[in-house]
Amino acid sequence: MAQTSDKAGQTFAHYWKQNLRAWGMWYRQSPGFFASTLLSSAGGGLAPYLTIWLSAQIISELAGGRDARRLAFWAALTVGVTALLALANGALNRWQEYERSRLSAVRFRPLADKMLTLDYAQMDCQEVQDLYSQIGQNDNWGGYGLYQTLQLFPYFCKGAVQVLGGIGFTLPLFLTDLPADSPLSFLNSPLALVAVLTAMVLVVVLSSLCDGKATLMLTKEAETFTFGNRIFGFYGFRLVGDRKRAGDLRIYQQLKNVGTPLLSDPASLPFFPGSSVSKLSKGRVGLLFGLCQSLTAVMTCAVYLFVCLKSWGGAFDVGLVARYVGSATQLFGGISLLLQTLSKVRVNGNFLDTTFRFLDLPNPMYQGSLTTEKRSDRNYQVEFRDVSFRYPGSDRWALRHVNIRFRIGRRLAVVGPNGSGKTTFIKLLCRLYDPTEGEILLNGIDIRKYRYDEYLALFSVVFQDFKLLALPLGENVAGAADYDRPRAERCLRDAGFGDRLDAMPHGLDTYLYKDLDKEGVDISGGEAQKIAIARALYKDAPFLVLDEPTAALDPIAEAEVYASFDAIAGDKTAIYISHRLSSCKFCDAIAVFDGGAIVQTGRHDDLVADETGLYHKLWQAQAQYYTQ
């Protein structure tokens, strides 16, 4: 669900504070962007005033003495100053664009860094996922959120410079009196000047209010815009361009049969004629934007009228008409730009609230202080002592009263039906979650007392839903750009990937997939699983945990992996989650899970012989397809 409207009770001061916080975050990443923007805005905002002033000198001379030397001087000065300003502003703008492009490349970095540093339990929470998704949707449809503050900063600076410069250049217009005998001498009255200024400022303010109101009305349709982007993104890009869906699309004519009712009815799409956004744009929003432009034109006419009346009345010559008209127009344009920018700050403040609500999420998991003992003998003993666990927000126990101790250097298989608690057991072991009840001990000490990063370093895990990156093969194995190449190659061969490695065009430097390199290679699910196993071996941690390590392998490849795995694991404590009970034969112990509890433990032969046990039932269910 996208963030939509102004929150009740929030003041502009609150939104301005949020905006300043965002600028502070960007400043720490790139001070150069703010320096270049300030200088570029100063140059771009003041350049028109200098050009207007020089042009006024030329016009005054043409309307007065027409001295050739003076005209040549002013003309040469105007050309020279204009050229220098153009060069300086061009260089400053180039610098600013360079700095902006650098920030644009890392626009999502603050959000990504936060997501990576969140406790796993926090990151895995659906509310946090929804909040993160909402931030991305807000940025996608309207650029709202953190990145919008980068867009607003140049406008704010330019508007401020225009206002300050305009006051200096325009102030004499209101301070220069008409001759006493002029029929327009009433314009010298302070009341008349206040009335004129008030009228001009009022027009500018009304114009800015119209623009802000229209923008705010559009942001209230954020959910509609987001839905539209999701439709076009899914049907226009992901669906038709996804090779994995290509077969189904053609065999079942899915896009025609499923997508047609939605895509064939323009009124059902957010941006087509007849939609709510279209009606709004043609109605109130369109009228407000039109009124904004009309009021700007009225203000310009008022400036011309006032300046020309004062010149006609004898307050100044015709040369100053050009100066005052130009500078006053720039001044009120700056006021309008500044007010519109501040209005957008208020609108964007709603979306910043969502962003900072995510960035301010705490990490409630206790971070211990004890260091894990570095043992060359890998003699780490782990014990589950009456451990029970419920996922946050659930009233169902995922694990209940689990008691088990790992024997060092042994192989433990964890088996059981789907949903029996096997993966939850592994997540608790790795301290991705903390137990709801009971405790997990490492060498007799509660694992919550150890430093979190050091405890995680004890485990190499191949999760069932592991991911590989579109990077060179060696970097995928090592998890780093600089790595031990012979070690990475050895791990790949130990994991059964040797033949495929020899066939790769660039060996360890071969890119996986074609996302970043057109010469990248696509790999099968089984090959990807072998690379993931090699990655776990490369880490060389005391505990090796494999969640369905051979699920994507064919029976022959599976047999090869298990035949060599005992030697590969060496002195590590290996834990396997598996549905193929044949893979449990080589394990020293088997823990059978059912309904969140351990219902059986023992070796394969003993468990198969127990005809009343769950393991025997599972074994028979699989074996019948082979024995028949």
Image (cartoon, helix red, strand yellow):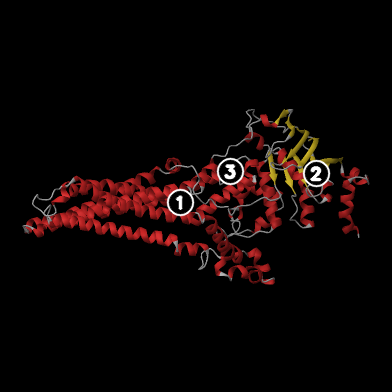
Q: Are marks 2 and 1 in contact (CB under 8 Å)?
A: no
Where residue 553 appears, as percent x and y from the top left, is: 75, 56
Amino acid type of the residue tagged 2 in the rendering: Ala
* Mark 2 crowd level (few <14, some 14–19, many ≥20, 10 Å Cα): many
Q: Does residue 443 appear in the picture of this structure?
A: yes
Which residue does the image show at 47% across and 62% down from the upper left? 280
Q: Is residue 100 above or below residue 446?
A: below
> Which residue is labeled 1 in the image?
104
Q: Give the mark nearest the N terminus, 3 or 2.
A: 3
Residue closest to the eye, 115 or 188? 188
Of marks 2 and 1, the one in the foreground: 1
> Which residue is labeled 2 in the image?
413
Where residue 366 sits, quadrant-wise, is top right
> Which residue is labeled 3 in the image?
116
Where residue 342 appears, as percent x and y from the top left, is: 39, 47
Amino acid type of the residue tagged 1 in the rendering: Ser
